[in-house]
Amino acid sequence: MRLNFFIIFIILLSLSYFVSNPILGVVYTSIAIIATIFRDKIMVAFLFIYYPLRPLLTTFNSGLLLLGDAIIITAFIKVLVVNRHHIWWKLKPLQPFIYFFVFLLLGSIAALIHDVTYTAIAIELRALGVLTLLVAIFAIQIWKRKDFYPIITWSIITSVLISLHGIIEKLYSRTILIPSEWQEWNLSSVNVDRVYGTLANPNVLANYLLIVFFLSFWIRPDAKTGKISLLSAQMIIFYTATLTGSRGAFLAMIIGFLIYVIVSRNLQFIKRLSLAVLLSLFLLGSLVSFADHQINHQNETTKEQVTEDKEEVDQDGSSFISRFKSMFSSETVEASTEWGRIYIVIKGLEIFEDQPLFGTGFGTFGDAATLHYSSPIYDDYNIPDDIYTDNQYIHILVATGIVGTLILLWFVISLLRQTLPNLSKNEKSLMISIIATLLTGCLYYNLLEDKSFMLYFYSLLGILLSRIRVMHHV
């Protein structure tokens, strides 16, 4: 019954994809709200399909834009209503989130002081806050093993399909299975050979694929066919992640992996991961290279164009290995200083010096809100409208100042103090490694706004808090 319901809902989503009328998307969202009231756990599992496909889906049907928000908010309200008689006791493990919501309040008040519109503030609060409700959804309810089956299964299936789509994007140089407006993007020579995928961003795609790849090693299928299928999926996912050329995502994953190994001393995990990585790079890599050679030699025009693009890309060091080698080259640093991450950090520190205590508020410097509404302070600092900070720390520092940064830091410390002492060794290792990955990733991207990554982070956090609550009979 659960599986049939799930499949029917996916078919309806496909209909909304192929029929681009926004009204159909709104109707589908309304159906999702009703479905969540009756089947909240299945609809929460559906989010693990929706968010990794969201940029692609909303390109064809803008009516699907708020589908995820609608499901999360409805599920949250249902959880509160169903557990209303003991809700305060069940919310006790979530006490550290009080500091997070104080942080959001501070950023909103500072934004109002600096003339940011209510709409812009709402966009940023949505970007930072909606997914945190998943923590409560998972922590308050009792989730049985059978409830996690759709999440685990469809996470891997979805990531494999997205990975295969990315490989096709690579082989056919973004000419098929890509929306026409995406094909028309004027990508720089550095980025033209990177895979953008269904998430329309190589860094976001890498974050998503690597978090699924990392978590997939906690699945232990019994049958031999299950083990082979899982290993094949891991190979495909990891190889596509390398095609994104995302240095920051791999750096964060490597740090998280090392910390997990040090804390857990799980040698079996190292063996399984090493096998998947090696087979992915050498076996699957060879197959894709062969397919690339065959496909791009069928048409001389395509061949010449691809060769020309690849030569241009190689000169700029855009391949996976060369991108790492050029990470700290003088050319990369100079370009970053003139119009990249270093430039943004310098501009951010300039703004911070003028508003050090409470910052300038949300919607003022390179966040989700400024992508839709121009910041009221950009003219004062000669900042272009289309920048994105790509660094969560400088964004937090500018938006909320020293006070907001310290509040958020205390939130993280309180969360660790609340959870770590009550977790098993394996759970503790997982928690520390995921948080280390998050903190590292925030150096190169506004990861708190990355829904595909934070979907897994907040869900995992809620699951761990639920186990703590059950352990203490709350």
Image: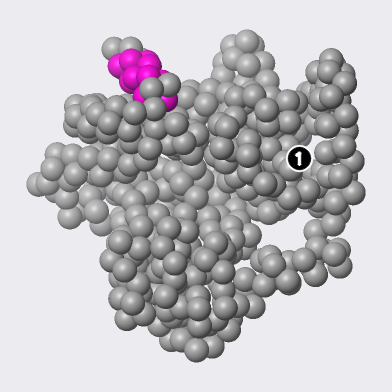
Comparing 167 with 242, the one in front is 167
Color encoding of the figure: one colour
* Snapshot quadrant of residue 24: top left
Magenta residues, dominant SS class? helix
Q: Is residue 377 left or right of residue 36?
A: right
Specify the quadrant of the image occupied by residue 313. top right
What SS does tag 1 mark? Answer: loop
Q: Residue at the location (89% across, 41% down)?
A: 311
Query: The N terminus is located in which quarter?
Result: top left
Left or right: 41 with respect to 241?
A: left
**Front-most of 372 and 39?**
372
- Residue 92 within the segment the image draws in magenta: no
461 left or right of 392 in image: left
Q: Position of residue 33 (x, y in %)?
A: 22, 33
Q: Position of residue 267 (x, y in %)?
A: 71, 38
Q: Is residue 211 visible?
A: no
* Residue 166: percent from left, percent from top: 65, 30
Residue type at numbered disc 1: Asp
Say above or below: 443 vs 426.
below
First to last magenta residue range: 5-17
The residue located at (48%, 39%) in the rendering is 55
**Which of 199/271 is in front?**
199
Of all residues shown, which one is farthest toward the bottom?
354
Kindly tell me whether residue 81 is visible in this rendering: yes
> How many numbered marks appear?
1
- Give the answer, above or below, for where 141 lies relative to 414: above
Residue plotted at (31% across, 56% down) = 94
**Label 1, on which residue?**
193
